[in-house]
Amino acid sequence: KTIDIASPARTQAILNQYGLRAKKKFGQNFLTDGNILSGIVQAADLTKEDLIVEIGPGIGGLTEYLARAAKKVLAFEIDPDMVKILAETLAPYDNVQIVEQDVLEADLKTVLAESFGEKSAVKVVANLPYYITTPILLALLQAGIHWEKLVVMMQKEVADRLSAKPGTKEYGVLTVMLDYYASVAIALKVPAKAFNPAPNVDSAVVTLTPKPAEKPVDHPKQLFSLVKACFAHRRKSLWNNLLQRFGKEEAVKEGLTQALQLAEIDPGIRAERLTLADFTRLYEALKEKKV
Ligand code: SAM
């Protein structure tokens, strides 16, 4: 019986065998703690029916756990050196497909349809490259894929932002956008020593469960672009950020004033106090007043 890819000894042996070290530029920190890997599998609630998308399989430590617990795993890996290693480490599993590609460049909808069939629901399970956590989350949420669960490891500080409450310093654009699509929970906290090499930060596994938007809008991207503009200068009032975004002409000011009144939002407030529902009302009011 072979030992797990993710065990500390085998992880180091694989890196030695290929004469490689974890690459910082790709955010490579390999999980070497079997308890954490089991915790991730558990948080994802995996069954043999599940279709999994993994981002950044690395040397395959998490992938192996996923392959054992799920029906099929499709994994995107940017680093050709890792892809070479995976061909060997994952050879025993016939239900894993590796795509050598930058996940941010991938046409997720098309690739998923090709691998899993149109409209199949997937679970995304990943130990994310931390330098692109936010772009990856946004890409997943906006790709128009049918996902039933996202279980993703990230820097604890980012996890805290995802689940922040209005009025706190962690609350921001990401919190509001996430709230549009999903319920967020922190499943596990993960100490740096669970990785080789140990990152400089603590980590957390976050689960996202889709929820239908309470007040869906016609163009979510436009709503988020408004939210971003409102947070452009965090310490400034909503009014100042809106002027910055829409211009300072008298007609614009008049339209903005009316829209804020219609939405029942105080122009002197800061964006960090506004909930998704507030931003949605503001978005609709701005459209109605043709700002
Ligand atoms: N899954 C492995 C584990 O848990 O041990 C490795 C996780 S490591 C934190 C992140 C992985 O993402 C690395 O293998 C890295 O090469 C890969 N990666 C980095 N940027 C990527 C990108 N844009 N697209 C796909 N994979 C990427």
Image: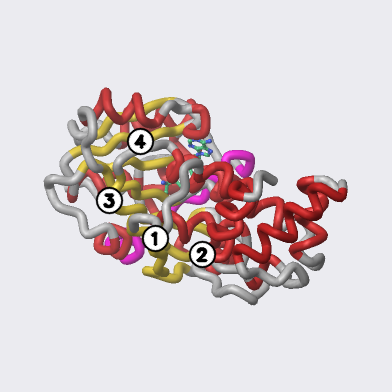
Mark 3 or mark 1, which is nearer the start of the sequence?
3
Q: For mark 3, what is the residue?
A: 148
Q: For mark 2, what is the residue?
A: 277
Q: For mark 1, what is the residue?
A: 214
Up/down of 44 relative to 93, above or below: below
Q: Quadrant of residue 93?
A: top left
Q: Where is residue 99 shown, x and y percent of the image?
A: 38, 27
Q: Is residue 7 visible?
A: no
Compute the Cα span from label 2 to label 4.
Answer: 36 Å
Compute the Cα span from label 1 to label 2.
Answer: 8 Å
Q: For mark 4, what is the residue?
A: 75
Counting other residues with Cα less than 10 Å from the Cα at mark 1, is it few (<14), some (14-19), or many (20 or more)? few
Mark 1 or mark 4, which is nearer the start of the sequence?
4
- Which amino acid is tagged 3? Glu
- Pair 4/1: label in front: 1
- Which amino acid is tagged 4? Ala
Compute the Cα span from label 4 to label 1.
Answer: 32 Å
Tag 2's secondary structure? helix
Q: Residue at x 47, y 48 (%)?
A: 217
Q: Is mark 3 within 8 Å of ligand 1?
A: no
Tag 3's secondary structure? strand
Compute the Cα span from label 4 to label 3.
Answer: 17 Å
- Pair 4/3: label in front: 3
Q: Nearer the viewer, residue 164 or 189?
A: 164
Q: Which residue of the protein is positioned furthest toward the left in this rendering?
A: 48
Q: Quadrant of residue 208?
A: bottom left
Residue 239 badge: none
- Pair 1/3: label in front: 1
Up/down of 99 relative to 9, above or below: above
Lateral position of residue 61 relative to residue 201, left or right = left
Q: What stretch is highlighted in magenta?
A: 24-38
